Amino acid sequence: MAARVLGKESGGSDSRFFTTQKKGEMHELRLELHSTDRTVKVDAVKKVIASMTVGKDVSMLFTDVLNCVQTGNIELKKLVYLYLINYAKSQPELTLLAVNTFVKDANDANPLIRALAVRTMGCIRVDRITEYLCEPLSRALRDEDPYVRKTAAVCVAKLYDIAPELVQERGFLQVLHDLISDSNPSVVANGVAALSEIAETSGRDVMKITASVLQKLLAALNECTEWGQVFILDSLAKYSPADAREAEGIIERVTPRLQHANSAVVMSAVKVILSYMDLMGNQNSDAVRSLTRKLAPPLVTLLNSEPEIQYVALRNINLIVQKRPNILENEIKVFFCKYNDPIYVKLEKLEIIIKLVSEKTIDQVLLELKEYATEVDVDFVRKSVSAIGRCAVKLERAAERCIGVLLELIQTKVNYVVQESVIVIKDIFRRYPNRYESIIATLCDNLDTLDEPLAKASMIWIIGEYAERIDNADELLDT
């Protein structure tokens, strides 16, 4: 933040302020901070902020920096306020000296300065300051400029974090509810964001979406910023429609968000649609089938993003396919791992493949998993071998093919592959008793290579369970 403020006005050339200063710099800075030349003063504050950003203690200059706040220059004011936010906790008494300036700036003719004053007072988490914040905040929430109102809305959430009883006493929650009816979509979005944050902090439903509020949220959805859309969609996801008709109406308004460029907006829209689908009848109804078809493409598109976004999308898709696997049942191929996928993405894709695999796709999946079992990452190889066993447990008709692949992998004689294969074959034996014991001989041949506790325990269970069919079971156990 500090570095951004510094570089903003001068096209990034302010990096010179971060160079190491010589001895006695505090004395020099103090002189510069009291300079009558505005440029010298701005540069001095920038040097102070730069030192603060790299971890130097410049709290001894508090009163000197504070004196610079009496200016009409927005750049200088922003820098001073940034400094105040940083040192307010350690110098609460001195911060009180700035209160008059905050109150004065909150009445400034320039809306940017009014908003800046209210935002800074909200960020200074000092109890003594909060008493002085209420009056300017109350005015800012009803300010004629939407920028000031939207800044004040977020400030209410910050104030609630420090003094919840004060927010209720002054009726700020009611004012936030009124902001949802504001003519400016950004103000509506910030009002919703503040109420959502307060609801999370307090554990109470302070949002209370009524039919009229619902229409205002849906109207603002088309016009506010992408992050505003996320807040509105998340609050809609918590709303319970009265009936299937209302749910369908909301979904119709939300569906265009599935094509949004921002992945957070897409995921929030998916969340709303999924939470309302239960109200729209059974899975075979035309409306639900139509929605199911619409949800697959945006989810698949998310997998073309950066690995970090892919990972978050995959975590969400993992939950979605547990409830509604039919949404992505024909898209299993997009979850096949690419050679350059990071390991955390590959492991998530494996989980989803197992959940989506069916008798129609098992042959393709087994070919993929067999390929993964020859990769270099040991953890991924183990998970891939384990996935073959989980497919066998899930699909009875495909169990024999899965066991065939596991036996091929055991023949590779790669130690960790053999051990993981033994562990999953034990699970297959438990799921289908007395069906595949013909492979026990192959397992016994690899007994000497087992050195991991879980693999040994699995082999002991197999030998114990099928002891009457193994001639030298007691000898094997002794080894």
Image: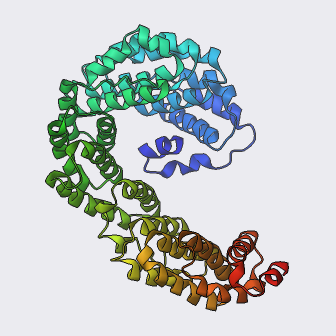
The reply to whether residue 341 is visible in this rendering is no
- Closer-to-camera residue (456/40): 456
Q: Quadrant of the C terminus?
A: bottom right
Residue 45 in picture, x, y percent from top left: 56, 34
Query: How many numbered discs?
Result: 0
Q: Is residue 226 above or below residue 241?
A: below
In this rendering, the answer to whether 59 lies above or below 302 is: above
Q: Measured from the top left, where is residue 221 in percent x and y?
A: 22, 39
Residue 59, image quadrant: top right
In the image, 295 versus 213, the foreground residue is: 295
Percent position of residue 23, x then y:
75, 41
The residue under the point 30% across, 62% down is 326
Is residue 165 at all visible to an observer of this figure?
Answer: yes
Residue at x-position 55% and y-position 28%: 85
Farthest residue, direction right? 478
Could you say which quadrant of the image residue 128 lies in? top right
Question: Residue furthest toward the front?
Answer: 468
**Colour scheme in the image?**
rainbow
Q: Say which residue appears at 47% left-offset and 20% top-offset.
A: 160
In the foreground, 55 or 126: 126
Q: Nearer the viewer, residue 115 or 157?
A: 157
Farthest residue in the top direction?
169
- The percent position of residue 240, horizontal first and vertical second, equals 28, 33
Query: In the image, what residue occupies the spot 43% across and 14% down?
Result: 167
